[in-house]
Image (cartoon, grey):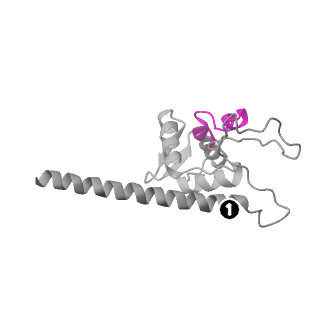
Amino acid sequence: MAKSALAQLEDQIAAVRREAFAAGYAAAMQVIQKAAAQPPASAGAQPAPSRRRRSASARPAKPTATAAPTVRRRRGRPAKTPAKAASRPRRGTNAQLISEVLQAVAPRAVRPAEIRTALQRDKGVAMAFTSIRHALGQLEARKAVEQVGDGRNWRHRT
């Protein structure tokens, strides 16, 4: 008995929700129809084209002469061009740039901060300290540079 009363109550609630949804939907459609029937606010402006597709029977036989064809553009990331793909530096470029800076200031030893400012000033390259440290490690493994003094200064090996 209790289950049937509960089921009836749930059915009644569902019916009320459906009726309320139908009433709200009908009211919204009336507002949309009224807005679509009114001319645009500015007399010179064209109304925005609808984004919904019409069925084949609702389409006009010929497009009007005043309607300009629209060009669709994809949203999202632009396609990669060959110029963008080539703009990435080649492998080993950081080590080569740092080696050139150290050769230019040789035989003096410099810190990574001085290497970074020289790269920005002379070559126009902004490089992170982590990248500089990694490149110095690579050059040290090749025996092209060496640490001097307390280990914070680097110089080119001759």
Residue visible at 60% across and 60% down?
30
Q: Nearer the viewer, residue 29 or 136?
A: 29
93 is within the stretch colored magenta: yes
Q: Is residue 119 above or below residue 37?
A: above
67 is within the stretch colored magenta: no
Question: Badge 1: few (under 14), some or many (20 or more) residues near its Cα, within 10 Å?
Answer: few
Can the viewer see residue 111? no
- The residue sitting at the bottom extreme is 41
**Horizontal side, residue 9 vs residue 21: left or right:** left
* Picture quadrant of residue 53: top right
Q: Nearer the viewer, residue 3 or 111?
A: 3
Quarter that holds the C terminus: top right
Residue visible at 48% across and 60% down?
23
Give the magenta-colored segment's residue range: 79-97
Query: Residue 79, image x and y in percent?
Result: 67, 36
Task: List the residue tagged with mark 1.
Answer: 35
Can the viewer see residue 34? yes
Query: Residue 39, image x and y in percent?
Result: 77, 62
As shown in the figure, which amino acid type bears the numbered disc 1? Ala
Say which element carries label 1.
helix
Query: Residue 82, image x and y in percent?
Result: 71, 32
Residue visible at 42% across and 60% down?
20
Q: Nearer the viewer, residue 33 or 69?
A: 33
**Horizontal side, residue 53 vs residue 2: left or right:** right
Query: Residue 49, image x and y in percent?
Result: 73, 50
